[in-house]
Image (tube, helix red, strand yellow):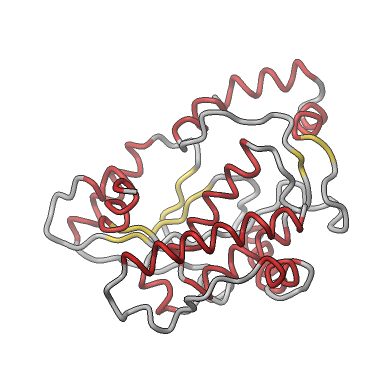
Amino acid sequence: MTHVLSNPLTDVKLEFAVLRVPFFLEPHYDESKPFIESNRDRLIKKWGGREGWERQKHRHDLKGRGEAAGIPFFNLDRLASNSMASHRLIQHVGKRYGLSISETLYDRLNVYYFVEGHALNDRKRLANVAAETLSQSLSQSKLSSSSSSSDSLQKTPMSEEEILDFLNGNEGRLEIENSLRVLNELGIHGIPKFIIEGSTVVDGAAGPDTFVRIFREIEQRGEVAGTAIFKDILGMDEETLSRGSHSRESLMLEEAA
């Protein structure tokens, strides 16, 4: 996305709307516990011991894929946990503040989990980090926005206490469960996967050139052929989706920050 946004080939205004679809690597994990085990222990068990884990690590080039995604260091001993609460929070923030804000929170939680090693179901810690991120991102959004197109979105960040109450509740659970059911029906049993224009499925192992080619085709066409197939399942309205999550303007603001 960054490459295509930074190097437009046409005069068409190009924006992306990224809708995160929840997926559970370990759906059996106890939701009542802050964490279950370290990710190192999880993977060693999954691949039948240390030798099996080492083979998988090299086979999938996990370090290289992390660097490509902007995560130069993976904390192998990060705390693995049930992720229902964090998935619910990302969806809620997207509906309340827009996809650009939920993407900012998603990026922060990637660092929180993959680099800092904290559990996604450590709700008090998660609420603290989320509240701080929302406050900063919404403040920056107010300074940079001169448009009234987002008047229907909330501007006041949720407090740490409000977020903790949300995490301890059940709002948004049904949408998550429904999306997991549809993923299973589609035969998607692993991540990452990308569904572009609601029809083109790209495996996470695909290189950057694959995505650039698909995005350039859309750019040359000048319009999107489909829509997000999980939009209605996750309860995301068309107006929020149409505002997008990534644009050339937002990219320039990030670079200037």
User: Picture quarter containing residue 91?
Assistant: bottom right
Residue at 34 percent across and 48 percent down: it is: 257
Left or right? Give the position of 112 relative to 30: left
Q: Residue reaching furthest top?
A: 51
Left or right? Give the position of 81 relative to 114: right
Query: Could you tell me how many numbered marks the image carries?
Result: 0
Residue nearest the observer in this picture, 253 or 227: 253
Rendered view: 51 above or below 72:
above
Left or right? Give the position of 204 relative to 191: left
Residue at 76 percent across and 27 percent down: it is: 47
Percent across and percent down for residue 220 are: 17, 55
Rendered view: 59 above or below 244:
above
User: Picture quarter containing residue 44?
Assistant: top right
User: Picture quarter containing residue 21?
Assistant: bottom right
Residue nearest the observer in this picture, 24 or 167: 167
Left or right? Give the position of 133 relative to 166: left
Percent across and percent down for residue 134 are: 54, 63
Percent across and percent down for residue 179 are: 63, 66
Q: Residue reaching furthest left?
A: 11
Percent across and percent down for residue 209 are: 32, 36
